[in-house]
C-alpha cells in the first residue's frame, strides 16, 4: 500500500474515532481506542445507539449487578451528553453477541420486535434482564 493510501486510512480512522470523543469522557475515549475487533465494534455501536440497545435484554446474568438492558453492559453513565463506559462487555461474548446481532439485523431491515424474538429464542435458557421492548417498529434512526 502506498503512503498516500495509508495516510488517508489513518486520517479516516482518527476522524472517525474522534467524532465520538466529544460524547465520551477522556477515560472512556482512551478505553474504546484500546479495543479491537468485535468488542470495539459493539462498543462503538452502543455509544452511537444507546436508545436502541435499551430495548434489548442481556442474557449473561448481569441483572444480578443491576443491569437493566444490553445498553447497561456498555454504558455506565450517560449524563449531559457525556458517556462513561463500563468494561463489563470486554470479556462477555453474550453482551457482544446481543449488541452486534441487533446492529446487523437492524441493518438488514428487521423490526425490533423480530430481533427481540430471535434473541429471546437463542438465549431462552439463560438469565435475562427482562427488558421491555419500547419500540415495536423497525428502527429508522440507527447509526452504524
Image (cartoon, helix red, strand yellow):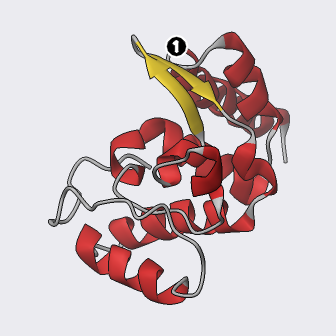
Residue at screen point 75% across, 60% down: 92
Residue 122's spot in the image, x, y percent?
Answer: 52, 87
Residue 111 visible in rendering: no
Residue 99's spot in the image, x, y percent?
Answer: 53, 60
Residue 15's spot in the image, x, y percent?
Answer: 59, 23
Query: Based on the displayed image, in which of its 4 quarters is residue 75 positioned?
Result: top right
Residue 137 visible in rendering: yes
Residue 41 horizontal side relative to residue 36, left or right: left
Q: Residues within 10 Å of mark 1 (few under 14, many from 20)?
A: few
Q: Nearer the viewer, residue 74 or 38?
A: 74
Q: Is residue 96 above or below residue 71?
A: below
For label 1, the SS is loop
Q: How many marks?
A: 1
Residue 112's spot in the image, x, y percent?
Answer: 27, 68
Q: Is residue 35 above or below residue 80?
A: below
Q: Is residue 141 above or below residue 91?
A: above
Residue at screen point 28% across, 75% down: 110
Q: Nearer the viewer, residue 94 or 124?
A: 124
Residue at screen point 58% across, 69% down: 59
Residue at screen point 60% across, 47% down: 73
Q: Nearer the viewer, residue 23 or 68?
A: 68
Disc 1 target residue: 22
Residue 80 horizontal side relative to residue 129, left or right: left
Q: Residue furthest front?
A: 64
Amino acid at each position: 500500500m502506498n503512503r498516500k493510501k495509508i495516510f488517508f486510512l489513518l486520517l479516516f480512522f482518527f476522524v472517525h474515532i474522534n467524532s465520538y470523543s466529544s460524547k465520551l469522557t477522556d477515560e472512556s475515549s482512551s478505553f474504546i481506542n484500546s479495543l479491537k475487533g468485535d468488542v470495539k465494534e459493539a462498543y462503538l455501536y452502543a455509544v452511537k445507539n444507546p436508545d436502541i440497545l435499551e430495548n434489548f435484554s442481556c442474557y449473561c446474568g448481569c441483572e444480578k449487578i443491576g443491569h437493566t438492558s444490553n445498553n447497561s453492559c456498555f454504558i455506565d453513565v450517560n449524563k449531559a451528553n457525556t458517556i462513561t463506559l463500563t468494561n463489563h462487555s470486554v470479556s462477555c461474548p453474550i453482551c457482544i453477541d446481543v449488541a452486534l446481532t441487533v446492529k446487523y439485523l437492524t441493518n438488514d431491515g428487521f423490526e425490533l420486535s423480530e430481533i427481540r424474538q430471535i434473541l429471546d429464542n437463542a438465549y431462552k435458557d439463560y438469565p435475562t434482564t427482562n427488558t421491555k421492548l419500547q419500540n415495536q417498529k423497525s428502527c429508522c434512526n440507527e447509526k452504524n
